[in-house]
Amino acid sequence: MYRRASARLLRSYGRRLSSSTPRPVIVVHGGAWAIPEPLTDASVAGCEAAAQAGWEVLQRGGSALDAVEAATRVLEDDPAFDAGNGAVLNEVGEVELDAIVMDGVDLSCGAVAAIGPVANPVSVARMVMERTPHCLLVGEGATRFAEQQGVPLLRSVDLVTAEAQQQWREMAAFPTSVKQLFNTHPLAASDTVGAVALDASGNLASATSTGGITFKRVGRVGDSPIVGAGCYADNDLGAVSCTGHGESIMRLTLARHALWLMHGRSPGEACAEALRQMHARVGGCGGTISIAPSGEVGVAFSTPRMAWACVRGDGDARSGIDRSASLAEAEEEGGEGESIVEVVRLDRA
């Protein structure tokens, strides 16, 4: 039994008695980067499966927190993504994983960083939130905690694909910086995964999980498990999950900044503006998925591609990965400013 579940349910019930019943929605992403053509179909299919898994939780009356965990676990189990099964190797050939969950009801959050090889780090992050007084456990301490909770510890080789091993060998031969890897080396880019959800009680939650970047320094942690950077959820503001160049996202605290920009903007436009500001200030690229308390959805990215999927309303399902033709052409012509960010128009037919 999760320790905080009863208190959270009571707070949720009290907050929403006088509100109209919202329409549940879930959005997931499979990472924003230069996704190569052979991976596009698998990336979209993986996001669609994850969104459906989260949607089924919501349809059964489950919480937003349950939905984002379920969806993220599906993404972690899919070797098409760099999270859990499919993780990449650090400079010494080992797996170090990062994950976070956040509950918009009371701002509870739990995260693990540089944890050893476990199949579903997002579930360990939830255990940190609900079974400890802490928000973040790292490294050996996080791994030991997972083992104490009965989570099976795997070998790095159990999670790593043949493609990831080849990437590691290539990067070992030509080492470079994390920023250069993300911006110039498609094989080493990060396909962080994440989910945001709104449930029938009007509660929001978010989750983010990643294996990091190929040949990263031992102990390197990006934005994913950092509250306010890679993930944020607040019933009064919205929910966001981020992906992209982790050091840039941390500098701007992208998730929290995007929510702040939602005042007077739609979720998509707010996240797009946050991505523009990140690019202008620190030169980083990335992507976001978001949900406003009203249930309005935002999907935006400044990379060549970002895999995403959404299910809402009466089961209306959408998914995608590519930039629109007009933005792709502008990018090829060296366009800047407004054209740098793709804002997905979910309300288009």
Image (spheres, helix red, strand yellow):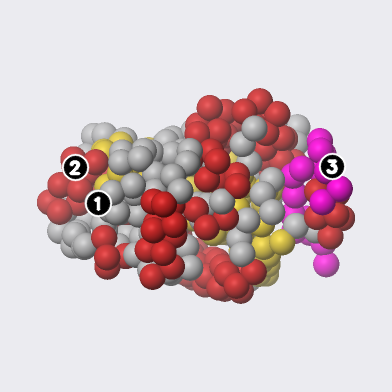
Query: Of the residues shown, which amino acid type is indicated by label 1?
Result: Gly
The residue where tag 2 is placed is 140
6 vs 139, nearest the viewer: 139
Real-space Cα separation, disc 1 to disc 2, in angstroms: 7 Å
Sequence order check: which comes first, mark 1 or mark 2? 1
Q: Secondary structure at mark 2?
A: helix
Q: Residue at x 57, y 69 (%)?
A: 39
The residue where tag 3 is placed is 335
Q: Residue at x 81, y 38 (%)?
A: 336
2 or 3: mark nearer the eye: 3
Q: Position of residue 317 (x, y in %)?
A: 65, 69
Answer whether residue 236 is visible to the viewer in this image. no
32 vs 220, nearest the viewer: 220
Up the image or down, 252 lies above or below 99; here it is above
Q: Which mark is residue 116?
A: 1
Up the image or down, 57 lies above or below 29; here it is below
Q: Which residues are magenta?
A: 332-349
Residue extending farthest to the left is 148
